[in-house]
Image (cartoon, rainbow, N blue to C red):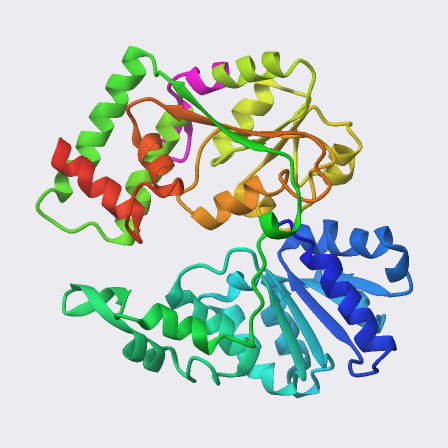
Amino acid sequence: MGLGKTVITLSAVLRLLYDYFTADRVLVIAPLRPAVDTWPPEIAKWAHLRGLSCAVAVGTAPQRMAALQQGADITIINVDNVEWLVNHYKQRWPFDMVVIDELSGFKSAGSRRFRAMKRVRKYIKRIVGLTGTPGDLIGLWSQIYLLDEGKALGRTLTGYREQYFRAAKYVHGRPVQWEPKSGAEAEIYKRLEGLCISMKTADYLQLPERLDIIRMVPLPNDAMAQYRQMERDMLLPYADGYIDAGSAAVLSNKLLQMTGGAAYDGDGNTVVLHRAKLDELQQLVDEANGQPLLVFYGYKHELERIQQQHPDAVEVRSPNAVERWNRGEIPMLLAHPASAGHGLNLQAGGSTAVWYSLPWSLELYQQACKRLHRMGQQHTVRIFHLVAKGTIDEHVLDVLSGKAKTQDGLLHALRARIEAI
């Protein structure tokens, strides 16, 4: 992450198009924000790339169609519209080269986007996948399949799992968790030699120091009592049963909402519980002394409550928010890690980030932190983590820091709490 994958790829595309004439029309598939705010500005930023024409096929269907009809060197589309694009062209697929930015977005072999790309893979002569966070070994299969159509890891996910993994847990007689067989990880990596290039930022760039700072936030006594009661009420029914991924997500989401100061009731209304993290965020604003803050939130009610307290805060999806942030015009930029966790260049606008609430996803966490700590950053990057003391926040932090030695830290943490209470 932050090593310049975008400009490297664009430089290669330029040569393939106009020096070697081995590519004719290029499609870039990216998450929405990078598709709009990273790829086109990157072409405009570098003098040697300004001869490339690009069209951004996002928005309404007529807007996407208008972009496709431009016949640009590079057409950029967001990942959620991949299925639409495949259905539109079918056998008339016009792109002989495809670049998938954040290839890890295709790690689910059952996803509609993967199945759509699989249908047109035979029409693509050259395909490139970019990611700083490829995910776990199981999720590698579908990503690699799009690159080589099954040559390295096999043509089916079932065959891949049978060869390299064994079932680690069963529910109702069906495997729900897998672990690699002895020596499988090394064998998988060996099969990827010549297909993948892995580069670490620290080996090639001298970046400013990054400081990870934990701010423990004690909850008020009444709010803590409410949290403990909710934790017991939600967890104890599973004491003699099994928590699956679906129920675990519901349980953890409710508890994480409460640590942030509010929660949704059964009718979808927001119930405010405390201001502990809001007050801590205000303290950070005061300490910043005018320096801008990038704040990551987890829930819509957190966004709304932060904006109520800080009316000058701007959500990253607002028009021209990224450009205004990088020009120093926004004192507080609010971002959900899922919408700003990949590809955005935010290092010019500030060097301090705040995690108002933490995600369970290590990929989202790492990607979001890299929005500031990347090439071009001139200052020490400070990453603050607001952690409600004695709550599920501490378990999330353990998972993200690698202290929880388990593939599924969420389930592990909840089961540990059941045993404790």
The picture places residue 52, in percent across and down from the top left corner, at 87, 65
Query: From which residue to which does the magenta span run?
Result: 261-279
Rendering quarter of residue 103 = bottom right
Query: Relative to residue 192, is residue 33 drawn left or right?
Result: right
The picture places residue 407, in percent across and down from the top left corner, at 31, 54
Quadrant occupied by the C terminus: top left
Residue 266 in sight in this render: no
The vertical placement of 205 against 262, above or below, is below
Q: Which residue is drawn at 80% across and 80% down?
A: 24
Q: Residue at x 28, y 13 (%)?
A: 222
Instruction: Name the residue nearer the viewer: 34 or 373.
Output: 373
Q: How many labels does the image show?
A: 0
The picture places residue 159, in percent across and down from the top left corner, at 33, 82
Rendering quarter of residue 395 = top left
Residue 40 in sight in this render: yes
Q: Residue at x 85, y 70 (%)?
A: 70
Query: Residue 93 lies in magenta, yes or no?
Result: no
The vertical placement of 248 against 153, above or below, is above
Q: Residue at x 24, y 53 (%)?
A: 244
The picture places residue 384, in percent across and down from the top left corner, at 51, 27
Instruction: Name the residue nearer the viewer: 139 or 11.
Output: 11
Query: Relative to residue 122, is residue 412 drawn left or right?
Result: left
